[in-house]
Amino acid sequence: MGVANRLDLTLRLVQGADRISVSELSQRLGVSEMTVRRDLDALERQGLVRRVHGGAVATRAREEGSGFAAREPWQAATKDRLGAAVAALVEPGSRVLLDAGTTTVHVAEHLAARAPLTVAVLSLQAATRLADRPGIDLLIVGGRSRPGEHSFVGPLALRTLESLAFDRFVMSIGGVHAEHGWSEFSLDDAAVKQAGLAQAAATVAVADATKLGVRAFSQVAELGAVDTFVTDAAAADDATHPAGPRTLQALREAGVDTLLA
């Protein structure tokens, strides 16, 4: 296991427990306690965990209460893997709507390899990643930029989306729940996603495994509104994500293709 992936898993294990010991992390990860301490020190410097006697506790803010910059370091290696997997599903020559979010920024990084593409983006971060990339015809949807997120929302964004048609919508999501479907923490973000779903021939949703079993504030759509869901392999591990296997099964029963990256 590479260092970045080990850090991701360490953080996932800390986040999933009220408190976890160095010895337990060592056993779960198959590395020495010295390595665990070094990894916890690195995560603490990023503000993602807090060291306590004999172990660590998570300090990550709840998703709905933290901005893009605060969430960006969370599981960066996992999100990059997801980004590559989603980009591989995009056919050259497609018209793509790319949602806002920390994971879709990684999708943007990998889309250049799928050129030529027309890509409409819903965030300033994605626009920056794709600007001046050869073979990428970049469209910025516009609208109001949400403070802290730099995602485009509001009536102007909705009117722009309603005037366009896409082959594929790459949708990030705040939560996916077996009974309650796809949901978001922001009403504005939920409205933009609903417009994207309506204007795309197919939709790929992407999220790391921590989003499975989560019911956020505003429902976006029923499970079956999405064609493909890409998440990381940890979603199938009920030891770290108790709601993961059940949510994946519900998605499959709803006709959603699931891809574990």
Image (cartoon, rainbow, N blue to C red):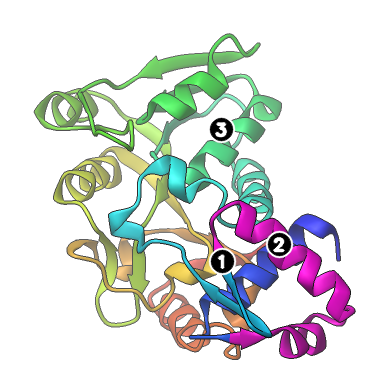
The amino acid at mark 3 is Ala
Q: Quadrant of the C terminus?
A: bottom right
Where's residue 133, x and y in %? 62, 14
Q: Tally the numbered discs.
A: 3
The amino acid at mark 1 is Val
* Badge number at residue 41: 2
Judge from the rendering whether residue 76 lies leftward or rightward of residue 208; answer left or right: right
**Circle 3 sits on which residue?**
108
Depth check: 19 or 66 in front?
19
Nearer the camera: disc 3 or disc 1: 1
Characterize the local packing of mark 3: few (<14), some (14-19) or many (20 or more) Cα atoms within 10 angstroms: many
Would you say residue 48 sits in the magenta stretch? yes
The amino acid at mark 2 is Asp
* Badge number at residue 49: 1
- In this rendering, the answer to whether 200 lies above or below 1 is above
Using the rendered view, name the quadrant where residue 205 is placed. Answer: bottom left
Would you say residue 34 sits in the magenta stretch? yes
Question: How many angstroms separate mark 1 from mark 2 (CA)?
Answer: 9 Å
- In this rendering, the answer to whether 13 lies above or below 100 is below
* Badge number at residue 111: none
Characterize the local packing of mark 1: few (<14), some (14-19) or many (20 or more) Cα atoms within 10 angstroms: many
Q: Residue at x 61, y 46 (%)?
A: 83
Judge from the rendering whether residue 55 lies leftward or rightward of residue 244; answer left or right: right
Q: Secondary structure at mark 2?
A: helix
Q: Secondary structure at mark 3?
A: helix
